[in-house]
Image: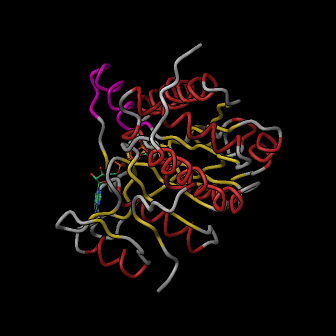
Amino acid sequence: MPIVTPISAQIAAEKAGVLAEALPYIQRFYGKTIVIKYGGNAMTEPELKESFARDVVMLKLVGINPVVVHGGGPQINDMLNRIGKQGEFVQGMRVTDAETMDVVEMVLGGLVNKEIVSMINQHGGRAVGLTGKDGHFIRARKMFLRGPDGQPVDIGQVGEVADIDPELVSLLDTRDFIPVIAPIGVGPDGAAFNINADLVAGRLAETLKAEKLVLMTNTPGVLDREGKLLTGLTPQTVDRLVADGTISGGMIPKISSALEAAVNGVGAVHIIDGRVKHALLLEVLTAQGVGTMIKRDE
Ligand SMILES: Nc1ncnc2c1ncn2[C@@H]1O[C@H](COP(=O)(O)OP(=O)(O)O)[C@@H](O)[C@H]1O
Ligand SMILES: CC(=O)N[C@@H](CCC(=O)OP(=O)(O)O)C(=O)O
């Protein structure tokens, strides 16, 4: 007879408590869509990637529809370095010439996308990888930034979302597939556009009328100048934090996309630390608020 070591009553109660805690969240999100932005900075150790894949599969199995939008900024930088090029950013957006666009498509649409798809599938999910070129479902237009003098700055083949057709993603959801989306859009003439993944995730969450948008990154959330975690952020507070330089770089498109989603009807928007194991599960299925919550108003 196999020998079974009994776990202590206390550990058993703790484990049962955690599992039972998930019930109201499963009920609340059952049949609903959650858009998850998986940032390139959160894709570090294999163990973390695996915990992410398991979390996504688990959400799907309990009846929630996870839709993954991934980034891959650091992975693009690595590939650019290999061909002797240096990544260059303006206000958190990559300056994208024709050669860089090829690398972006190769890395995001190819390597990174397929790694995530394959990891989810290895854990029993049915993930399908897409870029906005598939069914032309993410239509883009060229993005112009404003320089300090108010003049437009041309950063090349960088796009903003013009329009998202939700049909393809909804179809995959209803057939129990898990869409995994690379942030590449298509212009009116069929050209590819490099779009910041936070912007795609935010617009997709709005278009799909998602219950929740979770942005997974490499900080505990939005931090103040002393490194303290800020939460319950509103448009007014964010404007002030950007103006005084507390929020900078890649956090700028992230927070503006989070705010837009909150203002445009996405029930809950969170920026969380993707370097924490099972951060996604903790965020969605427990009362453990990990990270910064964004609110539409005071
Ligand atoms: N106030 C802030 N709080 C937290 N992170 C900030 C802040 N301002 C700027 N950042 C930077 O934003 C980064 C996250 O954005 P980004 O590098 O684009 O991540 P991701 O690849 O996950 O999208 C952080 O690692 C940090 O360096
Ligand atoms: C226009 C622009 O900047 N596009 C991003 C797309 C990838 C991305 O957003 O990746 P992370 O989420 O990992 O930062 C880039 O080229 O890096």
- Taking the spot 50% from the left edge, 37% from the top edge, the residue there is 52
Q: Position of residue 68 (x, y in %)?
A: 59, 43
- Left or right position of 4 against 58: left
> Does 287 appear in magenta?
no
Q: Magenta span covers which residues?
A: 72-86
> Does 77 appear in magenta?
yes
Q: Quadrant of ligand 2?
A: top left
Looking at the rendering, which quadrant does residue 80 occupy? top left
Task: Name above or below for residue 236 compared with residue 94.
Answer: below
Residue 18 seen in the figure: yes
The answer to which of 196 and 220 lies nearer the viewer is: 220
Q: Position of residue 259 (x, y in %)?
A: 49, 69
- Taking the spot 31% from the left edge, 78% from the top edge, the residue there is 240
List the single residue furthest toward the front: 1
Model colouring: secondary structure
Residue 195 seen in the figure: no
